[in-house]
Image: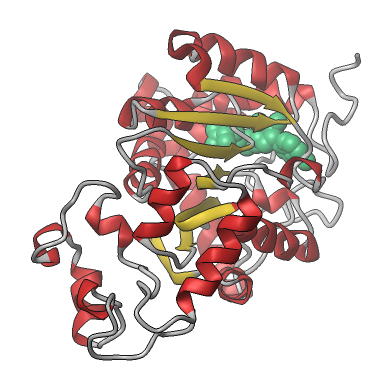
Amino acid sequence: MDSRDPTCQGGWDEQISQKFLDYGRYFVPERESQLQIIVDLVPCPDRPGTIFELCCGEGLLAQALLERFPACTVCGFDGSTTMLRRAQERLARFGERFQPKPFDLASRSWRAVDRPVHAVVTSLAVHHLERPQKQVLFRDVHRMLAPGGVFVVADLVEPAHPLGREVAAKAWDEAVRERALELDGTTDGFDFFQRERWNSYRYFDPEDIDKPSRLLDQLKWLEQAGFVDVDIYWMRAGHVIFGGWKPGSVTAWRDHQAGDSAESFDHRAEAARGRPGAFTGMPCSREFGIGSGAWPWPWRFTSPQTIGHFFAGRLNWPWRRSGMGTSPSAP
Ligand SMILES: C[S@@+](CC[C@H](N)C(=O)[O-])C[C@H]1O[C@@H](n2cnc3c(N)ncnc32)[C@H](O)[C@@H]1O
């Protein structure tokens, strides 16, 4: 196959894969911090669970996930054979815990799962989809997730104002230049970035394979898809990490561990939310560590943001489980 044949819907090809493999370490601002933040947002249990990574590339994020969650399996989806091969080589030591999956991000066939997944993460890929495709993806991911599961997106976003675009363009140049100097002591990596006109904030091209959407739109689409606690976790040079949680209960997670189909799982979780006395959604499940048994005095395990929610009365704490106090809150 000609390496310029588009491998994926949207225009990504094997030649671009190779360039990204060779130069991604310069092009992605604060790459290691980004990986760390994404992994920190995954509420994965210490028992077997499944994480989907969409467009896993060479498998850097998958590696971080596999190392952090030794009981979990990561399905690494990508449309590029070059990328998947590289990921397989990198992750061979994890055996069956890493499952490479060829796919097209825009297609919906891979989204029909027989078991709900615990987390869906993706880095630098969603911007290859058109606006309506992103909205469909967000809804489908919500459906695929187990209650309490997270969707984390790291991606380029479209600045809302022309001056915001200028700021992003300048900041991205600076980040790449800094990174090239830090890694090699030369600006070679940055020179390549410029020669390739990779900075899509500076070199706008309507035919571009990059179709970033505004951050605010994407946050709204997440909420419209049913995600809660939608938030932004990091941002630099037009690159953002954002995401949200699927409301859900610890009980449902436990049932899931025992084995359950995605549909019956969703159905029972919905039913539980509307039932007095049921555990009514748990947007804070990530702070507890599923299956950790860390019920008493949750603030020992919690984040400042959650404490803020607590005082604002937005969390469903355990004492609501048996109908003590308030009625179930709809997601
Ligand atoms: C910029 S790279 C990011 C790779 C990796 N996630 C990372 O952050 O290092 C984009 C990845 O998305 C994949 N990709 C782009 N468009 C795709 C599509 N429509 N379907 C499947 N994969 C796609 C590419 O093969 C590539 O691995």
Residue 126: image x %, image y %?
A: 66, 51
Q: Residue at x 44, y 50 (%)?
A: 255
The image quadrant that residue 76 belongs to is: top right
Please name the residue shown 18% across and 51% down the image.
293
Compared to residue 126, the image places residue 82 above or below, namely above
Q: Residue at x 34, y 34 (%)?
A: 47
In the rendered view, tell whether residue 26 sits above or below residue 296.
Answer: above
Q: How many marks?
A: 0
x and y percentages locating residue 199 in the rendered image: 63, 46
Q: Does 46 sit left or right of 8 as displayed?
A: left
Applied colour scheme: secondary structure
Residue 286 x %, y %: 31, 56
Instruction: Give the quarter of the figure containing the N terminus.
Output: top right
Q: Is residue 90 visible?
A: yes
Given residues 298 and 318, the one toward you in this image is 318
Observer-nearest residue: 325 or 186? Answer: 325
Residue found at x 54% / y 64%: 268
Percent position of residue 309, x then y: 26, 79
Q: Quadrant of ligand 1?
A: top right
Q: Is residue 140 above or below residue 247?
A: above
Quarter assignment of residue 78: top right
Q: In the image shown, does 108 or 204 lie closer to the viewer?
A: 108
Q: Is residue 241 visible?
A: no
Say whether residue 212 is left or right of residue 35.
right
Considering only vertical position in the picture, is 222 above or below 95? below
Q: Nearer the viewer, residue 314 or 207?
A: 314
Left or right of 107 on screen, residue 279: left
Answer left or right for 137 relative to 232: right
